[in-house]
Amino acid sequence: MGYRPALSMRWVFVLVVATATACGGLLRAGPTIPPLISARYLSVHLVMGDTADAQEKARLPALRDSLAGALPAAWATATQGRGQLFLRNEGDIDVELAGTNGTSALTQHTRGGKVTSRTITVHTIDGNRRLTIPDLMSTTLHELGHIWCCYGAGTSGGHWSDPQPTGFSLVGLMYPTIRCQASAGSEPVCPNVFSDRELTELRLGSP
Ligand SMILES: [Zn+2]
């Protein structure tokens, strides 16, 4: 009898996260040229949506505060110490924590082939699950990653197109789905570090 991993004690769920959505047809009132965004020094404006149901409305302020408090250190960890993140009222990018059910996504508004603004919407409900901070943090890192990642060979729709390793790993944030691991009664553990090839896409390939 060989060793059998205690899979029955654990369960793995899959959180489906949207591909980056490019809204090429959306024109804005006036052209705004964003600064070149650097993963080394990224500023984020984190806001709450205002269309949540009563239960999410009650959760949102604490979720926002937790995310805001943890995001700078989480970005440093995710970028293997190569990037810094700051919360600002005028950030490089708006992240809206929406207390609604939906598929989280980065939306890019373009004009004349140039990106004029970017917004990330992070939904706090996925189907009938109300997401926890580890889910939301991993989703936020993934969507921020879409600012730079992933294009070109070996990618599809902003994600890696090669098969995702079946085992759970903390490393690797840009597959089409974010797989978290959870044990009953405790918060899930979710990927939180960009892989080396993702760091290269983020232009953080060297320290
Ligand atoms: Zn994605």
Image (cartoon, helix red, strand yellow):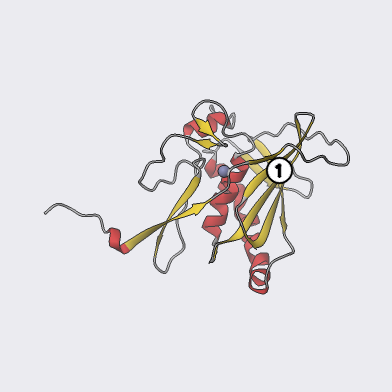
Decide: is 16 above or below 132: above
Q: Quadrant of ligand 1?
A: top right
Mark 1 = which residue? Answer: 43
Is the residue at mark 1 in contact range of ligand 1, meaning its CB lies under 8 Å from it?
no
Residue 205: where, in percent of width, then height? 53, 28
Q: Nearer the viewer, residue 195 or 20?
A: 20
Decide: is 184 above or below 141: below
At a point 48% along the width and 32% down the height, the residue shown is 196
Q: Nearer the viewer, residue 45 or 40?
A: 45
**Mark 1 belongs to which amino acid?**
Ser
Outermost residue, left side: 1
Residue 99: where, in percent of width, then height? 66, 63
Outermost residue, bottom side: 54
Residue 94: where, in percent of width, then height? 73, 48
Residue neighbourhood size for the residue with mark 1, other residues' Cα within 10 Å, grouped as few (<14), some (14–19), many (≥20): many
Residue 171 falls in which quadrant of the image? Answer: top left
From the image, which quarter does the C terminus lie in? top right
From the image, which quarter does the N terminus lie in? bottom left
Outermost residue, right side: 30
Residue 6 falls in which quadrant of the image? Answer: bottom left
Callout count: 1
Residue 75 appears in the figure: no
